[in-house]
Amino acid sequence: MKLVFLGVGDAFDERRGNTSIAVISETKLLLDCGYLAPKAIWRQFPDPNFFDAIYLSHLHGDHTFGIPPYLTRLWLDGRTKPLKIIANPEVIEKLPAIIDLAYPGIQKDFQYEVEFIQANLDGSVLLNELELTFAPTVHPVLNYAIRVSTGDLALCYSGDGQITKEAKQLYADADWLIQESFTLEPDPKLQMHGNVRDTIEVAEACGIGNIALTHVERKLRDRANEVESFAKEIAQYANIYLPDPDDELTIEDS
Ligand SMILES: [Zn+2]
Ligand SMILES: [Zn+2]
């Protein structure tokens, strides 16, 4: 399985874009599509039929508001293949209106079918060879972390928010965790975000050997050396990775 980090930034990072990741196996799955994401997707994956499905973790603009332009250009570029959009109930309920607000009436012109699939906490979504399962985090809007499994390989992505006990269960024994880590230490004023310390401690307790820190607060992320040396001090055994936009990674069962 290959990962392409299209963007790795917090909500308002002009250099690193919105956190958005392409998961490429037989099936092509895009994780999140915020308002800064389409430019990177168009550049990296110009084929309108490339992605089979998009997973949206939550309704915030830096994770979802790229959908209206992205879907519209798929139509203009001649997409014919149905597209699955998988997301929690809040996103599924509100997304059609968001597309309509951006480009009124456009959805009826699309020449490809958009299938909205609701992610539920008590079941999985099967996407060809990929099995998708979900867990809530603590965030101002409903956010589901996702686990993408195929064979013995499992990748987890947090979306945004503090890690819950349900998320820990979701993450258990995964090979890779891509985790929103806004600050270095837990911050009582930022109860709705993850942090580097919790990310590493939780991941290692879950038996995860590879961690990608994303959505780091932009001014902190400018000081990459500080983030990396802090992470190294905490990590007992995990490999810590601070991705940059356009980074590609081949991941294997570990
Ligand atoms: Zn965000
Ligand atoms: Zn958010």
Image: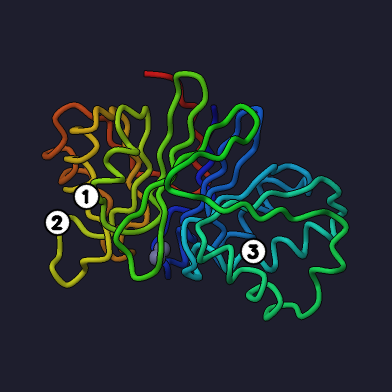
Instruction: Determine crowd level at label 1: few under 14, some 14-19, many 20+ residues with C-alpha closer than 10 A.
Output: many
Q: Are marks 2 and 1 in contact (CB under 8 Å)?
A: yes
* Quarter containing the C terminus: top left
Q: Quadrant of ligand 1?
A: bottom left
Task: Classify mark 2 as within 8 Å of ligand 1 or not, answering yes or no.
Answer: no
Nearer the camera: disc 1 or disc 3: 3
- At a point 24% along the width and 27% down the height, the residue shown is 207
Q: Which mark is residue 185?
A: 2
| CA–CA distance in space, label 2 to label 1 | 6 Å
Dot label at residue 67: 3
The amino acid on which the numbered mark 3 sits, given as a three-letter code, is Ile
- Horizontal side, residue 66 vs residue 252: left or right: right
| SS label for mark 1 | helix
Give the SS element for disc 3: helix
Q: Residues within 10 Å of mark 3 (few under 14, many from 20)?
A: many
Q: Seen in the image, is 184 located left or right of residue 72?
A: left
Amino acid type, callout 1 = Val
Between discs 1 and 3, the one toward the N terminus: 3
Q: Amino acid at mark 2?
A: Glu
Q: CA distance from mark 1 to mark 3?
A: 29 Å
Q: Nearer the viewer, mark 2 or mark 3?
A: 3
Q: Is residue 193 left or right of residue 4?
A: left
